[in-house]
Amino acid sequence: MTQGITVEMLTYARRMLLLGVVLAAGATCGGEPEAGAGGSDVTRGLLSAAGETAAAPTGRPSPVRDVPIEELGFNRGSSEAPIRVIEMSDYGCGYCRQFHLETFPSLREEFIESGIVEWKFVPYVTGMFDNSHAALRASECTLEQSPQLFERVNERLWHEQSAWKGSDDAAGLVRSWADEAGVDLSAFDDCQTNGRRADRITAASALARELGVRGTPTFLVVGYGPLQGALPLDTFRRILLSVQEQVTGR
């Protein structure tokens, strides 16, 4: 795991959420996103949010058995990237699936793999969807083995969301997918009852509550504020390019 996203960054993100600075909004699972902004309005709102000077709250965003923020979720990209994004999603959310299948691949290629953005994906259980716990446990226990295995299982969880959500044995189904991906099932099964894994899952949910996340997916552009919902690719690109210009002057 990289160390780029810190507690201080998350406290700033929490402040922006509490101030109601939802700079752009799309369809979400749960919550009531504000009306979406478009084009230059999104850019102006995003850049003006950087000048907010209210005092940031103190304390750990996720005080669950001292689970460090850097241990939550999965980091992609360089910790030296000038832009950092924290994504809060639920594997059972249809709009999260839409984002990961239709939008994220392009953002990943253009911004993450190029070193512009460090992206922290923090999945958690909102309590709205059947079998989300089974999916999240599978992703956590796969990540414990390797990032490469996690990517395979994570991709399948999104692609075949309807299969595990509607399964009478979701845990067995996602375990079989982990097996097909090359996961060590003995270690995988041990992880299912591992207290540390449970702590991370609990801490991710606590973080979402502390940040005031109202719906999924929610994206926290650190230093600029939150974006809510499955935004169109062009809108997301415009926002990140505007932040890049503001941060780097390019």
Image: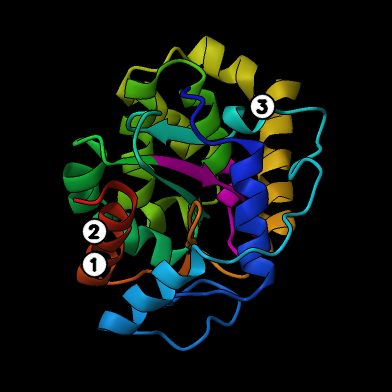
* Residue 117, image quadrant: top left
Residue drawn at x 36%, y 59% as measured from the top left: 97
Please report the bounds of the magenta region as a residue range: 119-134
Tell me the residue at 58%/82% (across/down): 32
Residue that numbered label 2 is attached to? 241
- Report the amino acid beneath label 1: Arg
Q: How is the image coloured?
A: rainbow
The image shows residue 111 at horizontal and vertical percentages of 23, 45
Q: Is residue 123 magenta?
A: yes
Residue drawn 36% across the image and 50% down it = 158
Please tell me the numbered disc located at residue 47. Answer: none
Mark 1, Cα crowd under 10 Å, few <14 / some 14-19 / many 20+, is some
Give the distance between the C-alpha atoms of the residues marked 1 and 2, in whole angstroms.
5 Å
The numbered mark at residue 197 is 3
Q: Confirm whether residue 229 shows in the render.
A: no
- Asked whether the residues under the numbered discs 1 and 2 touch, taking CB atoms below 8 Å apart as contact, a structural biologist would say yes
Tell me if mark 2 has few (under 14), some (14-19) or many (20+) residues whose alpha carbon lies within 10 angstroms of its own.
Answer: some
Residue 145's place in the image compared with 159, above or below, is: above
Q: Which residue is mark 1?
A: 238
